Amino acid sequence: MALILLGLSGALTHDPSAALYINGKLVAAAEEERFVRDKHAKNRMPYEAAKFCLEFAGIKPADVDAVAIPFAPISIFEPARWHYAKRYWYAPERALDAILTGNRRFYRYRKRIEWCLLQLGFDLKKTDIVPVEHHLAHAASAYFCAGFTEKTAILGIDGKGEYATTFFGYGEHGRIHKIKEFYDPDSLGGLYGALTEYLGFEMLDGEYKVMGMAPYGDPLRYDFSRLAKFENGELRVNTDYANVIGFRRYKEKGKGYYFSPKLVEWLGPKRTGDVADDPYIHYAASMQKLFEDLALQMLEHYLGDILRETGRLAFSGGGALNVKLNQKIIARPDVRELYVQPASGDAGTAVGAAAWVSVQRGVPVEKMEHVFLGPAYSNEDVIAACARHPAQPQWRRLRQVDKEVAAILVAGNPVAWFQGRMEFGPRALGGRSILGCPSVAGVADRINAQIKFRERWRPFCPSMLDTVGRQMLGSDHPAPFMTFTFAVADGWKERVPEVVHEDGSSRAQVLQRQFNPRYYDLMVELEQLTGNGVVLNTSLNRRGEPMICSPTDALNMFFASDLEYLVMEDVLVVKAALPAEFDGKVAPAAA
């Protein structure tokens, strides 16, 4: 009989998602935000995502053997709750709450999951709900999905789960062994999030913006070492400045932040606006340096011996999306391969929790080699969406999508690219993307200003052929998910300047044809036209919105931006009338 497991995340009131395993194969996974069109889908349960997973696989609720949730009760006899109470002594009501009713959040979450399951048609009396500790779910999402057969070091860094913030362990023979955890408020991810808020972005959303701002600053101009230290095997965050609760929080217009007035006293007013300016670029650089330095010290202390023995590391948690840290980890001589879970944030814990239960029940899970796990739409679906749309889009079926889209790109035009199943995780990887030709000067600025409506200093990333990766990046390290940055080789910076960041690096996706043949073939065409098998790739969405899911979503975005070309499956959509015979010849890009 098949083992069918549904993973549902959303315990921490953001990024709810669903994942479905059948006999160890991840057949579907999706984030709720994509369906409800609300970024991070805060305070929601993964109803639409779970509904999609079940319908896609033709599974009825009664067929599901267990529902795995990435949040579990934590015993009073373990150190986590006591550590929290001791470190938050200055907020006695919160400290006492951790000791006396420390699992209240778990029971509230379980009730909400039960409500969600009822809406989906589950019989709760016959439904086995299996709680998995949050950081164990992160660890499982990395280790079990990495496909490593050797002993593997496991690292988890995020804000926090129940109480844990950081996980060190190893996997061997399909089992995960915990070595050490740190607990709230001693959270490197939480500290980065607090500084993200101070720098004017939203926590759990803007951390990558801080990382993008950092190369413009001098990391040595300001010494951030007072914010956190790693000594004698323990991480300690300075709660005079960050990871604060209660009256220690800095408040502005009725909103409390995770940093204190003391931080503002030290560094000056909280940043506002979109400009990357002095001194804030230097603060971003200093925070990034502190994050990297402490993470690498912790990694060496707890996992260095295992890495020297095996060379394999699996990494997850929100901190694993810090691609600059990942670049430093790969540079360690003892690291042969780093696997970063492509959905390292909390959405990925739905995969991890379900994978954990699968392995516990004797069914190992397959390596996660791609993220194309969401809905797909046919040409007929696309044409029907065009027919229904009030803007009355003009469309035509293309005969040779790769050739004709390559011609549009080379003429300097950005193209919205909607193909196959939607990606799971935060990166657009060729399913729901906006593409540009990276050798066309100014295309990145055009996409930023006219389409994405986002900060001008934010970098764009390249997707490239596997035959190009070694030449451009100087590395053979697998990079299918845009989870690493690489120093761009001399010569290539001039060839594809629109995808090289301020510090000479690129967060790259190196393609294998088997997982997205149409996207790969598009780059083959680009290589024939320009000599570069590389494309600028950014997510198909506007600032503050989740990535596009359906053809209707794509059309809504298309008509609310300056995009001129939208390709969905074989269908080219434009705003003005098409010539009778569209042959891929296009007018040059507008100035």
Image: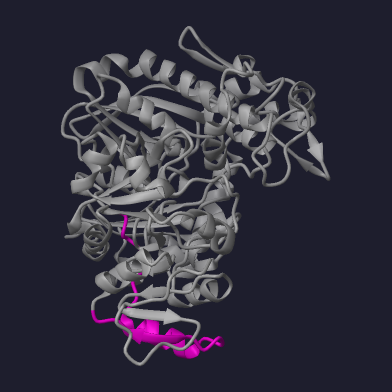
Q: Residue 5 falls in which quadrant of the image?
A: bottom left
Toward the viewer: 386 or 502?
502
Quadrant of the drawing holding the N terminus: bottom left
Q: Residue at x 36, y 15 (%)?
A: 300
Which quadrant of the structure image shows residue 298?
Answer: top left
Q: Nearer the viewer, residue 167 or 390?
A: 390
Residue at figure coordinates x 46%, y 44% from the top left:
345
Q: Position of residue 527 (x, y in %)?
A: 24, 57
As drawn, 376 above or below 161: below
Q: Is residue 397 magenta?
A: yes
Residue 377 visible in the picture: yes
x and y percentages locating residue 477 in the rendered image: 24, 36
Q: How far across and how far down the image is residue 47, in percent?
A: 48, 64
Question: Looking at the picture, does residue 176 appear above or below residue 262?
Answer: below
Q: Which residue appears at 30% of the width and 35% of the height?
A: 489
Instruction: Return the residue found at the far right.
Output: 253
Relative placement, left or right, of 93 versus 354 is right
Give coordinates of residue 401: x percent, y percent. 27, 74
Verify whether residue 47 appears in magenta. Answer: no
Q: Nearer the viewer, residue 228 or 174?
A: 228
**Residue at the location (31% across, 16% down)?**
304
Colouring of the image:
one colour
Q: Is residue 16 visible?
A: no
Query: What residue span does the magenta drawing correspond to?
Result: 371-399
Identify which residue, 82 or 317, lies in the foreground: 317
Whether 520 is drawn above or below 389: the answer is above
Total number of numbered labels? 0
